[in-house]
Image: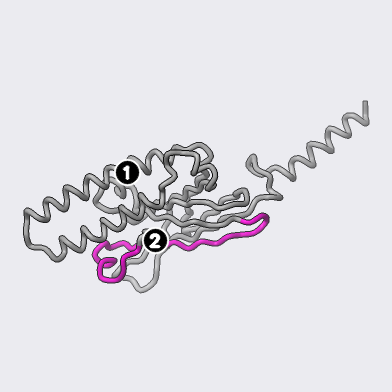
Amino acid sequence: MKKILAGICMLVVLLSFKIDNGHLSKENGTLSVFATYSDAYRSLNQADAGCEIYAINEADLKSTRFDDLIGVIERFQGYKYDYLLSIYNSVDPARIDKLRENFDALSDITAQYISGFMKLPGLMKAVTNSEGRAALSLRPGKYYILFVSGTVKSNNSAESKGNVGYKIVEIKSSLETIQHVCFQKQDMTGIMMARNLSGC
């Protein structure tokens, strides 16, 4: 009887070292994120506290109807850039109204897509702390990461809770993968610099 109890205790101790948040910690890698935002009125980037990070394994994503995450975000970012540039350079109220109508429609579609994406099973989530840092323990493999800024928001339905961006990262066993993301606080500032389809 003592041998059985000793065996059970030993098994519990061994499993406690092996299991980390329900995942095999020995095999997992770490995704470390440092999120910031840039402000046209400050020379240094500021920590983006409250930035939401959504990570999903490529295999899990490809088996869903949300497998075009990159296409959806890039279409939205590209049209947003073109829309802002057009209204910045236009004085025709009718043209501006039409552009806004088209952009609002695309924003609504993008917002619905993102909302559905955030409900996918197998999605891992983290939120950055006051220093703009967060970490996720993930199985090795290729991951699609959606970022939603905690500080930078825009006047459209897709980004009313925070501007969006994406990255694709490779997570390796027992290694740390570091990702830096930076959101631009002023839409018009981004217009004058470059078209950035990743959003961050």
The residue positioned 71% from the left and 50% from the top of the image is 26
The residue positioned 17% from the left and 62% from the top of the image is 86
Mark 2 packing: few (<14 Cα in 10 Å), some, or many (20+)?
many
Distance in Å between CA atoms under marks 1 and 2: 18 Å
Does the magenta-highlighted stretch encompass residue 8? no
Q: Residue furthest bottom?
A: 43
Image position of 64 with respect to 195: above or below: above
Judged from the image, the secondary structure of the residue bearing numbered disc 2 is loop
**Label 2 is placed on what type of residue?**
Cys
Q: Position of residue 148 (x, y in %)?
A: 39, 51
Image position of 70 with respect to 66: above or below: below
- Relative placement, left or right, of 153 versus 29 is left
**Label 1 is placed on what type of residue?**
Ala
Does the magenta-highlighted stretch encompass residue 175? yes
- Rendered image: mark on residue 1: none
- Relative placement, left or right, of 176 versus 13 is left
**Residue annotated with mark 1:** 111
Foreground: 69 or 46?
69
The residue positioned 60% from the left and 55% from the top of the image is 30
- Residue range in magenta is 172-196
Mark 1 packing: few (<14 Cα in 10 Å), some, or many (20+)?
some
Tell me which corner region of the image, top left, top right, bottom left or bottom right, holds residue 197. Answer: bottom left
State the quadrant of the C terminus: bottom left
Q: Residue furthest top?
A: 1
Q: Position of residue 149 (x, y in %)?
A: 38, 54
**Residue annotated with mark 2:** 200
The residue positioned 41% from the left and 52% from the top of the image is 70
State the quadrant of the N terminus: top right
